[in-house]
Amino acid sequence: MKVYPLLLVLLVSTLAYGETEATDSKKLKSLLEPIKSLSASFVQSIYDVDGFEIDSSQGRFRVASPSRFVWHVTTPLEQQVISDGNILWVYDPDLDQVIVDKVDGRLNATPALLFSGDLEGLEASYEIAQKSLNIEKPSFVLTPRDNGSLFSRIELQFADRNPAAIIITDTLGQSTAIVLKDLLLNPLLRKETFVFSIPPGIDVINNVR
């Protein structure tokens, strides 16, 4: 299964908020603010509009502010999506191909930067409402403010006040559930972690030049 890079980045715009939303926003920010970096394994499952699982994959996810991440799918088909905050690499070993792009405004309102440190951008891009009031297992629903978004909502779930799952629902009703496991908060991640070294003999589609 292939991962869509647009599911892996989130940026900014500006709007005002009502009192309830501001309160829920502050609660979410209080959970996200301590996270400067994160490492976890994940299981990703895709469900159709009737709730039947149609695909699944698993791998490893690492993210650090500002706007750096590694999304490495290991099974069933390997894929790596890597960003150093400026450049985005999408590597498909089975295709012997890597696509190189800039990280820019075209990647607005996408979820990976939930953990990237851009909390002002998070508020600007989403309406935020708390769904579960359980103190140890709160959950929040984020609705994109941009009507042109590829998805209709994101649900961010916590367990013991740590990120536990992200559920993304697209505009056609299909949902993607990403369950995080083996979570490490604020690990030391070197800059080199977020730079992709292109293997020899690989086709390169370079959209940066």
Image: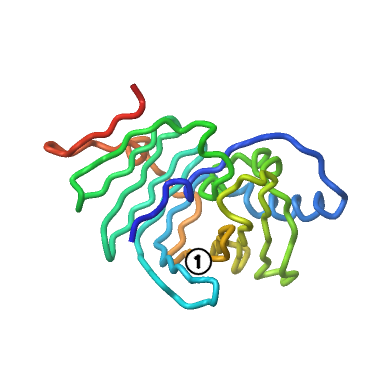
Q: Residues within 10 Å of mark 1 (few under 14, many from 20)?
A: some
Up the image or down, 126 lies above or below 180; here it is: above
- Residue 147: image location, x then y, percent: 67, 46
- Residue 148: image location, x then y, percent: 62, 45
Residue 55 makes an appearance in the image:
yes
Q: Residue furthest front?
A: 172
**How does the figure colour the protein chain or chains?**
rainbow
Which quadrant of the figure contains the C terminus?
top left
Q: Residue at x 67, y 70 (%)?
A: 136
Which quadrant of the figure contains the N terminus?
bottom left
Up the image or down, 67 lies above or below 166; here it is: above
Element carrying mark 1: strand
| In the image: residue 50, left or right of residue 63 | right
| Count of numbered badges drawn on the protein | 1
Image quarter of residue 122: top right
Image quarter of residue 171: bottom right
Mark 1: which amino acid?
Ala
Residue 163 makes an appearance in the image:
no
Q: Residue furthest right?
A: 19
Q: Residue furthest top?
A: 209
Residue to which mark 1 is pinned? 177
- Residue 42: image location, x then y, percent: 41, 63
Q: Residue at x 28, y 60 (%)?
A: 74
Q: Residue at x 46, y 33 (%)?
A: 103
Up the image or down, 46 lies above or below 154; here it is: below
- Residue 57: image location, x then y, percent: 35, 66
